[in-house]
């Protein structure tokens, strides 16, 4: 048995799913899905098209090269109207045939595929080639129906072949594995390509080509595409670790050496496994199922620790590679349904559902005790995908309620006037200015199919296979002749050690007529959360040695303690960030008693680590609640180690913001009559944070926000830190003080310049608008929305909070604004951050077992004040170009969209 320090502690379900959902309830939820799709799609067409993606916070399109680079994420963008192509077959599924026909005409007339731009081979394949093939499949189906698309002459297929030919140069390697990137115009060879020098690619990047490339070959009769995709899969299969039958995450495309040898079912590998099984479904080739079964047996043997899925090392599969999971593995329960292995699918999905209910969305990565590891959530659809497949397999209405949760959270936390915004931090509810194309391509397909009855779907989805981007490819392709030679694999049946599932037929039909079956599987998982069960002490014969080592006594540098750990089967791993990780293999303990001691030690260490984590302050939220934001803009802020702890405040602190004079806040406030009862805005620098807090508190402020003076700094690129005191008692500070980086702080300053009165809520996390305006006069456009929210809110949600304020909500006239493009942020070097001792920076630190809880270096009263004579007490005057970078870029064209915004607010929930 394997135990790691961060042990699973699942949250039990707080709600009883109750009776089956009525047909009317399902219809309303289905209609809500369509309305949400319309909101996202129409805003893309109105504000972003022909750009690749919509930026929903600034209401404009994301054009590569015109916006600050986001690194590899931008490799999906090729100036080919990505979102429109990715959405084509979604339009048909949602019965929007007229819009589909118009969209196809736009693609044919506007989209160019010969752009001189470097793109990801993987992303272009699944989104663009897959989108064109899915659109072609839908166009052919509609044309055969005799009512629509009668003019269509395979134009989308011709475009699909064009993009396929532009991807082919990437496969020009000795191994057959594709380069990770290709220039759409110049290929991969030559200096003009600006690519072709990469040596590594991820397993999923190379192994997720077969569905689209085989479909393209069989649609067009040209075998070259399928042949290249098969060759890449063959090479990956040959390079698997023969003892564990697992593959690594990253591979050298020339030598075939594994660069990263960790193996899981999440990021970097996920769709490789998916495409092996689905290639068998689509193409009918037993070779693919045989390979998948071999891999699947190893996954269930080494990676699956129900309900967890933990990465391991391919050469030492009993050794975990990490103690956290990424959100992309949420697709795996759906794949297990296709495999026919329902029990572990139910278990893992239940774990993911509890994480979703805990954080509102799946964080990009989370630990084995379900704390946030990476806080972002780019509106990924994998959890909705598995929810749909499990409902198809079990018929359990519990999964309809899970789908309702997804809908509610999207509407409450991600919906903005111009679409749906990704979550920058699920803990605070802050947004990121992105709406990826997969949100329209996948999320609304799975949610629509979850709630729609068979007669509400315009075609039989069982005649199609979903690609990893949820594009429809017809199963009839399996009977299409193909001329590419196929070398049968020599794998023997003896290699398969999973006899229970050999040659299982994929099944998404109702497998279990008894709804109690999935419920009975979920119950044991929920019981894991119960930590109150006493553990009897193991029997220890006289003379069997000293009592076991206790966690509170453990010291990582004590050789005797390390030897005791070894005897208990516990190994210690030093991480690069200075922490230590403890892992236990019970089978490696010297005796059963020692193994039991090891289990108890790990439990104690887990509790000790949890207590240390509670001492850390998570990020805080600054939510703009006044007109025209109404709580939709949330800024991620850093906390202080003094003043009011907002995590213990039910209401938070709410008030209007005012710039303090002097702006530094390092001397007595001169505009005290304006600061009194307000939240003061201050600039970082010249004195300690605690000194600033004391000055504004003396002036009568109810809170303070310190804005970074380092222009271009942002929470996107720099880690948040806790503002430390000044080395003496800070018990006299009784107001909350939060820190904003320059980019987020500038949003507040520009909003104040534009609207004069800006009201904010300082809290531990973003609040929904029904909570924000409870007990206060509601803006007219929110009254009906607030009522609907209260009527539909589930009983198992978080505790309701009621911010109060004596100030009335200020409503001003909506002004017409123009869009402005923000400039690229300047990066802050680690050395610059580390030397800012003038304000007592104290970065939040994770304290590992065996480490001191107090930092070895702390800032005290001897911290020197900054004496730079060039600093200015007043806010800097911005040049005209900078002034144009105002809140206009956040709320573009509000006047034009105001009526639509009002209607959206009424219908939101």
Image: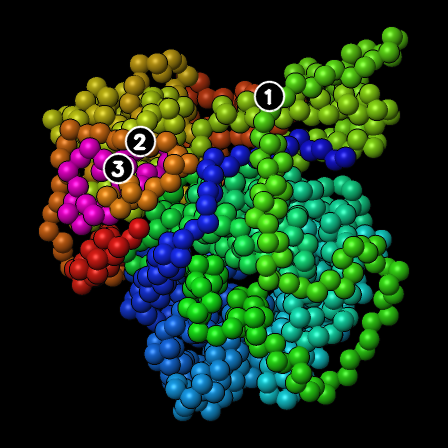
Quarter of the picture holding the N terminus? top right
- Disc 3 target residue: 772
Decide: few, some or many residues near mark 3? Use Cα within 10 Å; few <14, some 14-19, many ≥20. many
Nearer the observer, 888 or 164: 164
Q: Nearer the viewer, residue 56 or 675?
A: 56
Q: Is residue 72 magenta?
A: no
Tell which circle, 3 or 1, labels the residue nearer the N-terminal end.
1
* Residue 857 visible in the snapshot: yes
Q: CA distance from mark 1 to mark 2?
A: 29 Å
Q: Which residue is mark 2?
A: 801
Percent of width and height locating residue 78: 47, 72
Q: Which residues are magenta?
A: 761-785
Indicate left or right for 111 with 301 as reference. Answer: left
Residue 739: x and y, percent?
Answer: 35, 34
Instruction: Please tell me which residue is depicted at 44% across the width and 32% down the height of the picture.
Output: 618
Q: Tell me which residue sits at (70%, 70%) in the image.
A: 280
Look at the numbered disc 2 and give the secondary structure of its residue: loop
User: Mark 1 sits on what residue?
Assistant: 532
């Amino acid at each position: 048995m394997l135990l790691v320090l961060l042990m699973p502690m699942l949250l039990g379900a707080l709600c009883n799913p109750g009776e089956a959902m009525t047909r009317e309830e399902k219809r309303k939820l289905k209609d809500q899905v369509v309305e949400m799709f319309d909101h996202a799609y129409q805003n893309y067409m109105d504000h972003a098209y022909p750009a690749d993606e919509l930026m929903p916070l600034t209401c404009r399109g994301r054009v590569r090269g015109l916006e600050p680079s986001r690194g590899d994420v931008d490799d999906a963008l090729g100036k080919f109207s990505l979102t429109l192509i990715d959405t084509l077959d979604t339009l048909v599924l949602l019965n929007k045939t007229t819009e589909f026909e118009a969209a196809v005409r736009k693609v044919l007339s506007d989209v160019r595929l010969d752009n001189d731009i470097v793109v990801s081979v993987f992303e272009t394949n699944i989104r663009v080639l897959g989108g064109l093939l899915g659109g072609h499949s839908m166009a052919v189906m509609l044309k055969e129906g005799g009512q629509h698309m009668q003019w269509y002459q395979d134009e989308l297929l011709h475009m699909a072949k064009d993009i396929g030919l532009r991807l082919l140069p990437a496969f020009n390697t000795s191994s057959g594995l594709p380069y990770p990137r290709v220039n759409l115009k110049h290929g991969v060879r030559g200096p003009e390509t600006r690519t072709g020098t990469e040596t590594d690619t991820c397993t999923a990047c190379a192994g997720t080509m077969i569905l689209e490339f085989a479909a393209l070959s069989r649609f067009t009769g040209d075998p070259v595409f399928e042949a290249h995709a098969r060759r890449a899969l063959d090479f990956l299969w040959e390079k698997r670790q023969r003892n564990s039958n697992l593959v690594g995450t990253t591979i050298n495309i020339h030598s075939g050496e594994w660069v990263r040898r960790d193996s899981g079912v999440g990021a970097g590998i996920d769709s490789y496994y998916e495409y092996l099984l689905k290639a068998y479904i689509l193409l009918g080739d037993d070779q693919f199922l045989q390979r998948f079964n071999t891999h699947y047996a190893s996954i269930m043997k080494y990676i699956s620790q129900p309900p967890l899925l933990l990465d391991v090392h391919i050469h030492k599969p009993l050794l975990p590679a990490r103690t956290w999971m990424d959100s992309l593995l949420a697709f795996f329960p759906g794949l297990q349904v296709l495999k026919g292995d329902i029990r572990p699918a139910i278990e893992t999905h239940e774990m993911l559902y509890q994480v979703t209910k805990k954080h509102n969305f799946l964080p990009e990565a989370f630990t084995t005790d379900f704390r946030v590891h990476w806080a972002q959530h780019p509106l990924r659809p994998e959890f909705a995908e598995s929810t749909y497949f499990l409902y198809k397999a079990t018929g359990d209405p519990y999964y309809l309620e899970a789908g309702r949760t997804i809908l509610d959270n999207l509407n409450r936390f991600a919906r903005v006037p111009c679409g749906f915004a990704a979550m920058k931090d699920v803990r605070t509810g802050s947004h990121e200015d992105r709406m990826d194309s997969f949100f329209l391509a996948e999320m609304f397909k799975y949610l629509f199919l979850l709630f729609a009855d068979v007669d509400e779907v315009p075609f039989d989805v069982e005649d199609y296979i979903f690609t990893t981007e949820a594009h429809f490819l017809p199963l009839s392709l399996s009977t299409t002749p193909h001329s590419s030679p196929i070398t049968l694999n020599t794998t023997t049946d003896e290699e398969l050690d999973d006899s229970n599932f050999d040659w299982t037929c994929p099944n998404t039909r109702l497998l279990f007529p008894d709804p109690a079956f999935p419920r009975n599987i979920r119950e044991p998982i929920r019981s894991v959360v119960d930590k109150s069960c006493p553990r009897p002490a193991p029997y220890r014969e006289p003379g069997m040695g000293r009592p076991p080592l206790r966690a509170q006594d453990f010291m990582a540098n004590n050789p005797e303690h390390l030897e005791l750990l070894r005897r208990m089967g516990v190994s210690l791993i030093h991480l690069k960030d200075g922490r230590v990780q403890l892992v236990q293999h019970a089978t490696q303990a010297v005796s059963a008693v020692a193994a039991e001691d090891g289990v108890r030690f790990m439990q104690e260490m887990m509790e000790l680590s949890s207590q240390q984590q509670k001492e850390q302050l998570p990020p805080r939220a600054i939510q703009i609640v006044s007109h025209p934001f109404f709580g939709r803009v949330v800024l991620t802020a850093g906390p202080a180690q003094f003043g009011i702890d907002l995590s213990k405040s039910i209401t938070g602190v709410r008030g209007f913001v005012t710039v303090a004079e002097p702006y530094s806040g390092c001397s007595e406030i001169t505009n005290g009559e304006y600061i009194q009862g307000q939240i003061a805005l201050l600039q970082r620098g010249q004195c300690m944070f605690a000194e600033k807090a004391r000055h504004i508190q003396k002036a009568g402020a109810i809170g303070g926000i310190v804005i970074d003076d380092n222009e271009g700094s942002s929470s996107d690129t720099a880690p948040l830190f806790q503002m430390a005191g000044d080395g003496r008692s800070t018990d006299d500070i009784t107001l909350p003080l939060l820190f904003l980086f320059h980019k987020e702080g500038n949003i507040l300053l520009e909003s104040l310049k534009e609207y004069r009165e800006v009201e904010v809520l300082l809290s531990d996390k973003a609040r929904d608008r029904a909570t924000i305006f409870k007990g206060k006069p509601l803006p007219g456009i929110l009254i009906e929305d607030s009522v609907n929210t209260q009527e539909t809110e589930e009983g198992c949600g978080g505790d309701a909070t009621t911010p109060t304020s004596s100030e009335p909500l200020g409503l001003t006239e909506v002004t017409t604004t123009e869009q402005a493009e923000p400039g690229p942020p300047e990066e802050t070097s680690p050395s610059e951050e580390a030397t800012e001792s003038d304000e007592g920076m104290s970065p939040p630190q994770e304290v590992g077992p065996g480490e001191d809880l107090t930092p070895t270096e702390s800032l005290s009263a001897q911290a020197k004040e900054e004496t730079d004579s060039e600093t200015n007490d007043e806010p800097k005057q911005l040049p005209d170009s900078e002034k144009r970078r105002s809140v206009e870029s956040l709320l573009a064209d509000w006047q034009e969209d105001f009526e639509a915004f009002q209607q959206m607010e009424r219908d939101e929930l």
